[in-house]
Image (spheres, grey):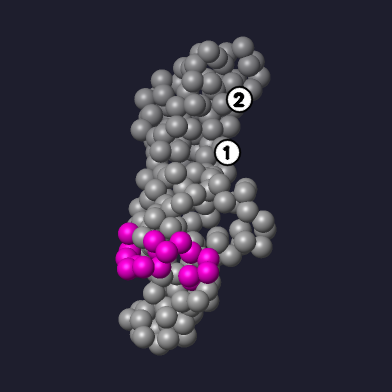
Amino acid sequence: MVYGELGRFPLSILVKVRQIKFWGKIIKPDSKLVNIVYKVMYSLQDINVNDKFKLLQTVKQIFQETGMSYVWLAQNVNQMDVNYLANEVKLILTDQFKQTWRSSATNSTKGNYYCMFKHQLALEPYLLNLPNCKRIWITRLRTTNHRLAIETGRWTNIDRQDRLCALCNSRLGDELHFLLYCQSLNDIRTLYLPKYYCNNPILDKFINLMSINTE
């Protein structure tokens, strides 16, 4: 959820891209001494599988996980192609992370609602436009970092269906109930929310309300 709200990617992607750029430089023949050392390491590893060099293993693994093993086997990249190669690795790793991120949000019980209103891994405008105090509370609500019954019940191992609202004790105390249903909050709700959301509340209205700043 933090990655989703901020629209950021793991630093490991940047590290791997830099490793590929470095590898692209040292395999150039005009790198002289460093290229000779690299060739020695590569030859030793090729002759004896027990000779393991962290640099070679890391770069090889990056190419394998991005489906570009052919580049590693070729061991020949022109300087003009290094930046292109690094960009391709970055693009593939980024796409892979997006898929993992979406799957993680969908399969997480904490992300039950989050994946309904958060569709793109992009910075949310409210983080830049709202005062700090309001931004914190909205972030906590969106990312299930709050003290509603649906979350506090998790801490004490209460079955999900038994995590009733602490105010009305009538329905599951989740974000949907808190924003649109709880009768104990009617006065505050009608004061701050448009009538559209207060009248005949449904899940679609909740998703729409939480998605106001996302598109």
* Residue name at image x 37 percent, y 45 percent: 99
Q: Which residue is mark 1?
A: 15
* Residue name at image x 64 percent, y 15 percent: 32
Q: In the image, 41: left or right of 67?
A: right
Front in this rendered view, residue 9 or 36? 9
The CA span between labels 2 and 1 is 22 Å
Q: In the image, 62: left or right of 125?
A: left
List x then y, in percent, for residue 71: 41, 24
11 above or below 91? Answer: below
Of the two numbered discs 2 and 1 in the rendering, the one whose residue sits closer to the viewer: 1
Q: In the image, 177: left or right of 128?
A: left
The amino acid on which the numbered mark 2 sits, given as a three-letter code, is Val
Secondary structure, mark 1, is helix
Q: Is residue 197 magenta?
A: yes
Q: Which mark is residue 60?
A: none
Label 2 vs 1, first from the N-terminus: 1
* Residue name at image x 62 percent, y 49 percent: 129
Any part of residue 38 in sight: no
Q: Which mark is residue 37?
A: 2
